[in-house]
Amino acid sequence: MNYLLKSESSVYYECGYSCESEIFIALSDERFFITDGRYTIEAKEGVKGAEVIETKESLLESAKEILKKSAIKEIIYDPKEWSVFEFEKLKADLSLNFKAIKNFSQKRRIIKRDEEIEKIKKSVQIGAECFDRYARYLQNALGKEEFELHFDALDIFGDHGRRAISFDPIIALDHNSAKPHAHPTATPLRSDSFILLDAGVKYERYCSDRTRCSAFASDLNFDKTQHFNNPTHQKIYDIVRKAQEAAIQAIRPGVKAKEIDHAAREVIAKAGYEKAFVHSTGHGVGLDIHEEPFINRKSETIIEENMIFTVEPGIYLEDQFGVRIEDMIRVTAQGAEIL
């Protein structure tokens, strides 16, 4: 199989190294990692199973030279990895059939290998420990605005700059939590605040992702079992938790991804909040924070053993608050393992 890769996660999966300036080419039994002089030393140390080529001109021109010298007639590429400008420049003067396969690399790595599963489990473990640390921090953060709470979340989850994080953490209070991807505001943490935290870390490039809700208290925690003084908070939280449990129960090899989504959505719809569940039920997690498989109402993907994805239903009440509960799941022969 002949294919062309450009995204860092895709390339890292193939050869154990990536950088921001690279093109990876696989031609049957030949593999090439093209980069520029800024990364050559690191590439020669890190790349496995591919020839490192330092370009003296441009990555695209070097890639074209390799393709011109080859005898291949067709090569696979992912159109999501390329700008129109770059792709048009790449294929100019090449008598090749460029076969577009969306999410090509993600499809190749949709079933996680044993070593990947262990790295993801470690990432999840570290992330959970950070949730506990952040809960302790919040107990002494009354009066701080979301801006500062967000800044300190970056510090805690990033271990003071020593660790990469999966994505920009979401720390949303009260009405701001009704926005699924809320940005920090000047809303202060109060003694009666509703709190939503969505965050994750990376371990050896592999991501984790988790969302929890809580309320400010002296024993504030991000356990999945929560007791809210506000009865509306409790009601919505319990519905979302029931929806997540239903989706997890639906997971097993052989089902379609849309059936898992339906299981969560059905619980929320029966409770009268169908229109308040505004996103999909989950997404794959690995080298990318969002990758195959996607657990949504249209996905025909057949679930297989050792796929890893999130289950994260939510209910969002505009100008009030929002609840999302998210865990990462590994598919097993028996069903679902909550990581």
Image (cartoon, rainbow, N blue to C red):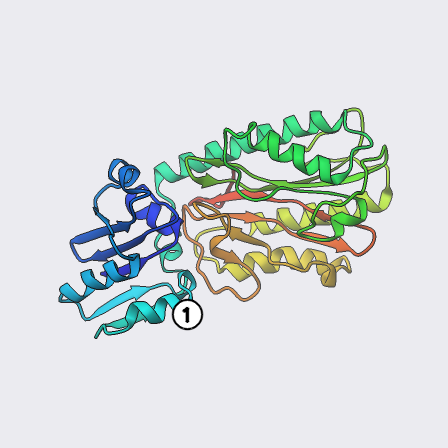
- In the picture of the structure, the residue carrying the numbered disc 1 is 84
Residue at image coords 47%, 55%: 293
Residue at image coords 19%, 71%: 73
Q: Is residue 335 above or below residue 101?
A: above
Q: Position of residue 228 (x, y in %)?
A: 81, 37
Q: Is residue 240 visible?
A: yes
**Amino acid beneath label 1:** Val
Q: Position of residue 32 (x, y in %)?
A: 22, 52
Quadrant containing the N terminus in the rendered view: bottom left
Seen from this angle, which residue lies furthest front? 57
Residue at image coords 56%, 53%: 282
Q: Is residue 57 above or below residue 310?
A: below
Q: Position of residue 151 (x, y in %)?
A: 66, 36
Between 68 and 14, the one lying in front of the other is 68
Q: Is residue 101 visible?
A: no
> Callout 1: 10 Å neighbours few (<14), some, many (20+)?
few
